[in-house]
């Protein structure tokens, strides 16, 4: 339950930070690019390697390709 609360709080904080930084950042594309890059780097560091388990990898890649 704690992880769910932390996930909701961090998701809300990302939204708040992006709205506050909208005044300082001229292009939304640059802000979103850095956001996705940092998410990728943090996830690789947290997981320990690029592909930790290949069990659900094809489904995740398919969903990522479909959703863009």
Image (tube, helix red, strand yellow):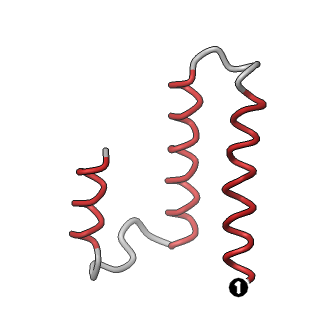
Question: How far across and how far down the image is residue 56, in percent?
Answer: 29, 77
Residue 24 horizontal side relative to residue 7, left or right = right
Residue 62: which quarter of the image?
bottom left
Q: Residue at x 28, y 78 (%)?
A: 54
* Image-based side of 12 in relation to 39, left or right: right
The residue shown at (72%, 32%) is: 19
Rendered position, 5 above or below 1:
above
| Residue marked by disc 1 | 1
Image vertical order of residue 4 relative to residue 9, above or below: below
Element carrying mark 1: loop
Nearer to us in this view, 23 or 34: 23
Query: How many marks overall?
Result: 1
Relative to 14, residue 62 above or below: below
Vertical side of 21 occupied by 50: above or below: below
**Place of residue 52 in the rendered image (x, y in percent of width and height, measured from the top left):** 39, 76
Residue shown at 58%/18% (left/top)? 27
For label 1, count other residues whose C-alpha is less than 10 Å away and answer few (under 14), some (14-19) or many (20+). Answer: few
Asked whether 58 or 48 is in front, the reply is 58
The N terminus, quarter of image: bottom right
Residue 23, image x and y in percent? Answer: 75, 19
Outermost residue to the top: 26
Residue in the foreground of this view, choosing between 26 and 42: 26
Identify which residue, 61 or 8, lies in the foreground.
8
Residue 64, picture quadrant: bottom left
The residue sitting at 27% across, 82% down in the picture is: 55
Q: Split into 4 quadrants, where in the image is the C terminus?
A: top left
Where is residue 13 drawn, in percent x and y? 75, 50
Q: State the image quarter where residue 25 is shown.
A: top right
Q: Is residue 42 left or right of residue 60?
A: right
């Amino acid at each position: 339950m704690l992880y769910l609360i932390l996930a909701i709080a961090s998701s809300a904080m990302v939204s708040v930070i992006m709205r506050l930084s909208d005044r300082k950042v001229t292009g939304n594309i640059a802000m979103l690019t850095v956001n996705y890059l940092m998410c990728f780097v943090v996830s690789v560091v947290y997981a320990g390697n690029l592909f930790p388990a290949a069990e659900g990898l094809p489904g995740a890649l398919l969903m990522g390709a479909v959703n863009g």
